[in-house]
Amino acid sequence: MKVFKKTNKNLKTDNQTGFGTNAANYGGRFLAKDGSANIEKRGLPFFDQISWFHTLLRLPAWKFQIIIFSVFILVNFIFAAIYYFIGVEHLNGIVASSEIEKFGQVYFFSAQTFTTVGYGHISPEGFLTSAVASSEALVGLLGFALATGLFYGRFSRPKAHLKFSENAIIAPFQGGKALMIRVASYKNTNLTDAEAKLTLAMRIEENGVNVNRFFPLDLEYSTINSLTLSWTLVHHITEESPLYGYSKEDFTNEKGEILVFVKAFDEMFSNTVAIRTSYIFKEIVYGVKFLQMFEHSTDKTKTVIHIDKLNLFEQAEV
């Protein structure tokens, strides 16, 4: 039955995924776990392939801060070197007994000029030194404007604060079995009108040629009014499902991928946010069921959701 289903011409396919049908030129999975496309772009100069604005917005906070501080130190080092080679005698107020101390004072003068603080302890003298100092002040103003915009963009960018379970599962459901994936909101945000879509991606052989085929997986509930607790995405594996007839060994030995797309309306940003991920067959656990992850509080006045239990499951007969 399994082979028949995979080659059944009556199965509905999704031809609008954007991944194409030529399986011979694809490697690995279609989507990474973080939802990014598993694509490497070549054929252009390195700097033409990257949107620095989007890259800086998406960097982890610690990497972004390291880049900001590194650029600040590097720019001031460059200007300090320029002042030093022009001659420290053109900077009034420098008192130092060694060359390292002179360079250190020149560096901190550069930092004061770059940030437009200007304590006044050291001042430029002469046309060339003054021109460099005024140019550095302009670079500093533009640089801090750019950094401020990036900080604002990182904080104000709408983001779907949703976590997916690490594994998809095959669990008992209504006398049969179902594919289940759990998702939960983990921030103090209000998400409404949530919508989910699952797609099965497989490389199959048709007329002696390997092709990519994408099969939409119907959900028990594809939309919910409010995503306040956890939401279990349930695809009932019936005879109409492309997963019908698959056993535990099939999920272990065969290659396939479940593409997950979720979008919702964020009331705080008054905007739609979206997130995606995927599960290859080896990340699907067969014959288990998710454990309950919320309960009432001690005084029974609130519902408590345990985000750390998002991926907890136990054995179950299917």
Image: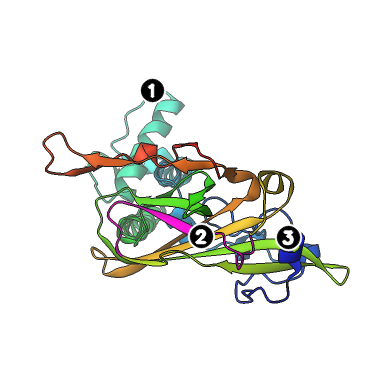
Q: Using the image as rendered, state which of residue 190 and residue 168 is in the foreground.
A: 168
Q: Which label sits in the foreground, 1 or 3?
A: 3
- Image check: 313 left or right of 257? left
Marks 1 and 2, how far apart in space?
A: 76 Å
Give the x, y percent position of residue 263: 40, 65
The circle drawn on residue 1 is 3
Provide the secondary structure element on which disc 3 rests.
Answer: loop
Q: In the picture, residue 18 is in which quadrant?
A: bottom right
Please report whichever mark, 1 or 3, sits nearer to the chain's N-terminal start.
3
On the image, numbered disc 2 is attached to which residue? 235
Give the x, y percent position of residue 95: 32, 29
Q: Residues within 10 Å of mark 3 (few under 14, many from 20)?
A: few
Marks 3 and 2, how far apart in space?
A: 19 Å
The circle drawn on residue 50 is none
Which residue sits at x=60%, y=71%? 17
Q: In the picture, residue 191 is in which quadrant?
A: bottom left
Quadrant of image for the N terminus: bottom right
Residue 222 appears in the rendering: yes
Q: How is the image coloured?
A: rainbow
Q: Using the image as rendered, state which of residue 282 and residue 285 is in the foreground.
A: 285
Provide the secondary structure element on which disc 1 rests.
Answer: loop
Residue 42 appears in the rendering: no
Q: In the picture, residue 137 is in which quadrant?
A: bottom left
Q: Residue furthest front?
A: 175
Which portion, as a residue range, is magenta?
A: 225-243
Q: Quick check: marks 1 and 3 in contact, CB under 8 Å?
A: no
Quadrant of image for the C terminus: top right
The circle drawn on residue 97 is 1
Provide the secondary structure element on which disc 2 rests.
Answer: strand
Q: Which label sits in the foreground, 1 or 2?
A: 2
